Amino acid sequence: MSTTDATATQAPPPRSVPGTGTAGRHILVVLVLDRPGVLNRVASLMRARNFNIDSLAVSRTDRDNISRMTLTLRGDDVAVEQAAKQLYRLIDVLKVQDVTADQVVEHELALIKVRATDANRGEVIKIVEMYKGAIVDISAESVIVEAHGTEAEIDALVALLRTYGIKELVRTGATVMLRGAGSIEEALKL
């Protein structure tokens, strides 16, 4: 059988179906009017589209009555793009931007209460200093660590501190801003 005969009898490669690709981490920045119920509508839309929000950071902006949401979620590109388009249809949503592929500055804040005794407190403090964190409270049996950085940096610090015993942990979730002169808020036409 010749090479051309072999390729002629092979089935064509399977076509990819939109929305069934590999799920990856996505970051959406959403500007909204600061009104009651907006957060609920955004979260309900994500639930209806079967997304689990990994983190959600909401804060006021420099403009009166406008808030900024940073949503971190997992999903394939097509499904996240569809969810972003659906967000635009919500009342009070002004702008949606998927910044996953953009150059951004990303930070997360974490407070971690770690078991610490006189015997191991020095080790804990050295680990915290290595990750450019700070000790914000010390008691006889624990220390509270404040750390900031990317999700991966916080994850790495938490993994190291877990060996000492984490009593309590709280994280803000990712907050992001585009690098350079571009601004999602300036792009907003009001």
Image (cartoon, rainbow, N blue to C red):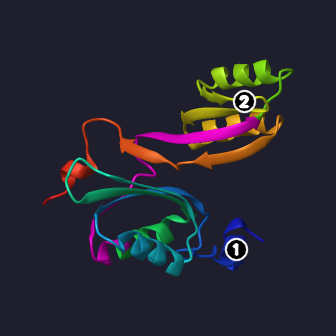
Measured along the vertical axis of the image, is residue 43 above or below residue 190?
below
Q: Which mark is residue 139?
A: 2
Under circle 1, the secondary element is: helix
Q: Nearer the viewer, residue 81 or 29?
A: 29
Question: Of discs 2 and 1, which sits in the foreground?
Answer: 2
Magenta-colored stretch includes residue 103: yes
- Please give the name of the residue rendered at 42% of the width and 68% of the height, measured from the top-left corner: 81
Q: Nearer the viewer, residue 19 or 176?
A: 176
- Please give the name of the residue rendered at 29% of the width and 69% of the height, measured from the top-left corner: 35
Tag count: 2
Magenta-colored stretch includes residue 123: no
Identify the magenta region. 87-114
Residue 139, percent from left and from top: 72, 30
Q: Magenta stretch: dominant SS? A: strand
Q: Nearer the viewer, residue 47 or 26?
A: 47
- Of the numbered discs 2 and 1, the one sitting upstream in the chain is 1
